[in-house]
Amino acid sequence: MEDSGQDAFHQKEQISRVLEYAYDDFALAQMAKKLGKNADYDILLEHSGYYKNVFDRKVGLVRGRYANGTWIKDFRPDGREAYINEGTPRQYTFYVPHDVGGLSNLMGGRQNLEKALDSLFAKNEYWHRNEPGHQTPFMYNYTPTPWKTQLQVRKILTEKYSDGPGWTKWK
């Protein structure tokens, strides 16, 4: 929480930065591997796992964390937080598209990943207008109920899109 990231895109939005940079590092690791830069690949792949540093196993979500390892005290899983850009801890928790298996393990397994996804959608917390969430409905493919991907995608297509101009169905 102490790092304001003055030179970063997400200034003072540490959770967004950590999660998005973890994905970026994964993508760069893949390029390094193709280029035969094995040392770079190893370092970048390790950095792609840094999202685990901001995942609080006790609450099962990402959460603001101080350099000394303590978690931010006032935690609102479904509230806007200064350390997250355009979202909530519950929404941003799922922005680990490069390591869904690792996120699932942090949550305690595939059934718990499913429960966390169910909770997000049941609370109407899924926010399709924010790009880091676009992959979220597809994460059901890593649970015992992959058919829920089709259910949520169909709801998104019918409830959020129209054949008219603009964002006519956005709530």
Image (spheres, grey):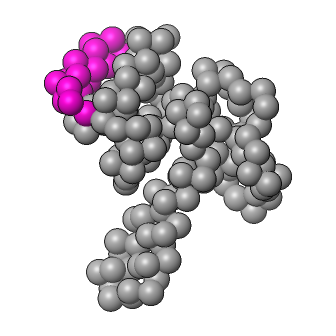
- 47 vs 105, left or right, is right
- 91 vs 2, left or right, is left
Q: Main secondary structure of the magenta part?
A: helix
Query: Residue 87, relative to residue 120: is it above or below?
Result: below
Q: Which residue is depicted at the point 39% across and 50% down?
A: 102
Total numbered badges shown on the rendered structure: 0
Q: Which residue is depicted at the point 31% across and 29% down?
A: 111
Query: Residue 36, relative to residue 97: is it above or below?
Result: below
Would residue 154 be seen by someone viewing this image from the given angle?
Answer: no
Q: Which residue is depicted at the point 39% across and 45% down?
A: 105
Q: Residue 92: image x %, image y %?
A: 53, 36
Query: Residue 100, relative to residue 151: is it above or below?
Result: below
- 42 vs 149, left or right, is right
Q: Residue 42: image x %, image y %?
A: 43, 78
- 155 vs 81, left or right, is left
Between 8 and 107, the one lying in front of the other is 107
Is residue 145 in the magenta section? yes
Location of residue 142 by image quarter: top left
Is residue 130 in the magenta section? no
Q: Which residue is depicted at the point 60% across and 40% down?
A: 56
Q: Residue 47: image x %, image y %?
A: 52, 67
Would residue 146 be seen by someone viewing this image from the given angle?
Answer: yes
Q: Residue 166: image x %, image y %?
A: 42, 20
- First to last magenta residue range: 143-161
